[in-house]
Amino acid sequence: MTRQHIISKKIILAFLLLCSTVFQSSGEEIGYVDSRICMLSHPAFQKFDWQTRRFFDTISAPARNFVEEYEKLKKLETEANAALKKVEKDIGKAFAGKDDKNNMLWQKRRKIVEELTYIKQRREVLADLQEKDQTIPEAATTWCTLHGIENDLTNVYDLVRQKHNLDYLLDAAALTPTQHPPEPQMPVLSRVKLETLMENPENLSSEEFMSWLANSRHYWQRKLPGVFNNPFKHGATDHTQAACTMLKNSFEIKTAEPSEEKSEN
Amino acid sequence: MRKKVKIKILLFITLLLLSCGNASHANSPFATIDYRTCLVLHPEMKDYDFVTQRFTRPQLKRDDMTTMQAVYERMAAKQKELAPKVDELLTKQSKLQENIAKTRLNWTGEAAKLAQLKVSKAEIDKRLTEARTRDENRLEKMQEEFAEIDKEIVLLQDSIWNEVFLSRAETVKKLESIVKELDEFIKETADKLKVSCVIDDTLTAPQAPPEILQNIPDNTPLWANTAYQIILKSPLPEPNTFTIANHWAPSLMKSIENLSFQHLAHRKDIGSIVATVRPSRLFISGNLDITEQVCRALFEKYKFNPYLIESLLKGIKMFRER
């Protein structure tokens, strides 16, 4: 094979590659999730009290019995402190050992520190409630849990996007209606039929047609919400279910504000 | 020499392909549509009767007065014949409705009754759960019965209106085919325009204007925007100039941050106020809206008169720009 042949083959190969990239990029992958459904699938929402709008087992939980809870916290604190001492001792021993074990121990320590932070902050919340003679903590105490949920959601959306090679991942919640359309005025719809309006094209710029159109849109949106309320009419795939499954399986609930103590992870 | 010509030809073809590739792309992968307008103006929808919630039969000779007179007479006779049966079913349904409401109310009563008994909280919770399970089963049964009666009424109405209107089942089937056809037209238009995704961006506009305060205190400024005004009037540090503000620059920055946070919390109110003036749109500019193209394609398929098509499109445009 001559050198000339090899060069021309290389050129043809490069040409074919170029062609394939040009044609590959002609369609974009677009997916969507409904962030409201995803949010409700997060394990934290299984502990959400809809009446008080607070999360149970976190610093925002409504207080039921102060004495009982203080006692419970004291017991938890004793256990957590003992566990912390033990894990720190183990970390010291494993310092020179394998990375895997070390990582696991630091992970364990992080969890214990988080629990101790929760105990400390919950005590402060309880004290504040007692002082104000209330049982439901301030709404701001839910922020740490909500912030944790937001972070988990962002991670899951990134995973979904990567896994399905999506160019865009949109949020259906931003485009779906937040309220029912108004009740249509039936006299407007029953008084005149579309067919009658179309008999004279002049009618189609009349106030009567505008009113008929507005009311019939409301009528059909109420009658067939499944057809109308999905804003994606073509070309976008729904990944809500996949995102919800990931959320249900793999995240923990943030119970308190993050501790300021540094950890290795 | 031949090699050089070959390379030139290949380069030329590559450039041509690249430019074709670029030309085949729409400027944006997205397009918008007013789906509700497209569906309500689908040519087949002209036969829908909003009162009976059924389509009229297309072969019906509505302009032939003699035929229609005979049809209406037969319909009236059938209605008279079936009226007692329909009434009986309606009475049954209202009785069921009453029982459903009573059962639901029972839950609240049961809880109050149990709370007065001298039994433990656990026992109360147990009895309440039992009562709920029992009632829920009862409710489910009653609702099933209600739906069955509904079906019977629909069948009777179908038989009365049979000559003029499609039955409920036929209406559902026709609606499904209309929706399917519209979706196909949307897909076709999107493919033609090389658009990857079509979005209905008309669903989110709020319908009701925000509540207007009736009694505004006399000293309220016309545009109360205190947080933003405080930020703008703050004594701010200036670069390369000595001002007293330089001393507290870090804390000033923090308080501006807090004030901005407070101010931005009101942005949702602005949204609903603006939306009453004009509906919100997903794309402000650079968007491709395919409502007109889809409607035109549908009207043309059903062989509408060109003048009617233009008038309809003008009407749609007018409606959407209001």
Image: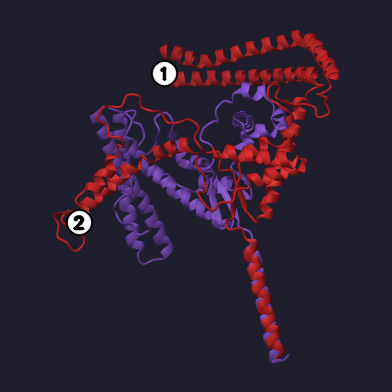
Chain colours: A purple, B red
Depth check, front residue: B6 or A90:
B6
User: Residue at coordinates 44% horizontally, 14% vertically from top-left?
Assistant: B112
Asked if residue A106 is positioned above or below residue A181 in the image, the reply reads below
Q: Which residue is mark 2?
A: B237
- Where is B165 relative to B263, above or below? above
Badge 1 marks a residue whose secondary structure is loop
Between B93 and A40, the residue placed more toward the observer is: B93
The residue carrying mark 1 is B120
Query: x%, y% of residue B37?
Result: 63, 37
Mark 1 vs 2, N-terminal side = 1
Left or right: where A228 falls relative to B210: right
Dot label at residue A249? none
* Left/right of residue B150 with respect to residue B317 in the rendered view: right
Residue type indicated by callout 2: Pro
Q: Is residue A6 visible to us here?
A: no
Q: Is residue A184 visible?
A: yes
Quarter holding the C terminus of chain B is top right
- What percent of the width, then of the height, locates residue B68? 82, 19
User: Where residue A156 sits in the image (x, y, percent)?
Assistant: 50, 51
Circles 1, 2 touching at the beta carbon (< 8 Å): no
Label 1 is found on which chain of the structure?
B
Q: Residues within 10 Å of mark 1 (few under 14, many from 20)?
A: few
Which image quarter is the N terminus of chain B in?
Answer: bottom right
Say if A94 sits above or below A252 in the image: below
Q: Is residue A142 placed above or below A243 in the rendered structure? A: above
Residue shown at 67%/82% (left/top)? B8
Q: Dot 2: few (<14), some (14–19), or many (≥20) neighbours within 10 Å?
A: some
What is the distance, in whole Å, between disc 1 and disc 2 at their CAs?
A: 68 Å
In the displayed orientation, state which residue is furthest to the front.
A202
Q: Tell us which disc is closer to us: 1 or 2.
A: 2
